[in-house]
Image (cartoon, rainbow, N blue to C red):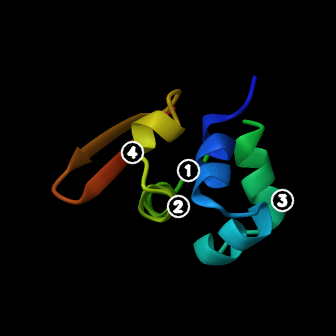
Amino acid sequence: MRSRLKDARVHAGYTQKQLALILGVSQQTVSKYETEAITPSHFRTIREYERVLGVEAEALFPDIFIEKTSHIIKVTQ
């Protein structure tokens, strides 16, 4: 199954390396997010994915509960 995250990245026209530079993470980290080997645990990373790719976090990371209140995101796995 293709990752929603990978689909969004490709649709936005980014390589893993380009997205990693924008997000301030390694290319390996982006790869691991896309293969679901790991999930982001920091709200800043999730918000940056939303901003850069223009897709809501709930669509990118459907297995993570994200509560948005007053500019705070609570990540629960």
- Location of mark 3 (residue): 28
Instruction: Pick whichever of labels 4 and 3 is earlier in the sequence.
Output: 3
Query: Is label 4 or label 1 in front?
Result: 4
- Location of mark 2 (residue): 45
Residue 56 visible in the snapshot? yes
Q: Amino acid at mark 1?
A: Ser
**Left or right: 69 with respect to 72?**
left
- Location of mark 4 (residue): 56
**Image disc number at residue 73:** none
Question: Label 4 crowding class (10 Å Cα cut-off): few <14, some 14-19, many 20+?
Answer: few
Q: Amino acid at mark 3?
A: Gln
Residue 21: % across, % down: 69, 77
Which part of the image, by quadrant, shows the N terminus? top right
Query: Is label 2 or label 1 in front?
Result: 2
Residue 69: % across, % down: 19, 49
Question: Label 3 crowding class (10 Å Cα cut-off): few <14, some 14-19, many 20+?
Answer: few
Instruction: Report how far apart the C-alphas of labels 4 and 1 lie in the structure.
Output: 16 Å
Residue under the point 68% across and 64% down: 14
Residue under the point 43% across and 48% down: 55
**Image disc number at residue 41:** 1
The answer to whether the residues at label 4 and label 2 have Cβ atoms under 8 Å apart is no
Query: 53 and 31: which one is in front?
Result: 53
The answer to whether the residues at label 4 and label 1 have Cβ atoms under 8 Å apart is no
Instruction: Report how far apart the C-alphas of labels 2 and 1 lie in the structure.
Output: 8 Å
The answer to whether the residues at label 2 and label 1 have Cβ atoms under 8 Å apart is yes
The answer to whether the residues at label 1 and label 3 have Cβ atoms under 8 Å apart is no
Instruction: Pick whichever of labels 4 and 2 is earlier in the sequence.
Output: 2
**At numbered mark 4, what does the secondary structure look like: helix, strand or loop?**
loop
Instruction: Report how far apart the C-alphas of labels 1 and 3 lie in the structure.
Output: 16 Å
Instruction: Report how far apart the C-alphas of labels 3 and 2 lie in the structure.
Output: 15 Å
Query: Is label 4 or label 3 in front?
Result: 4
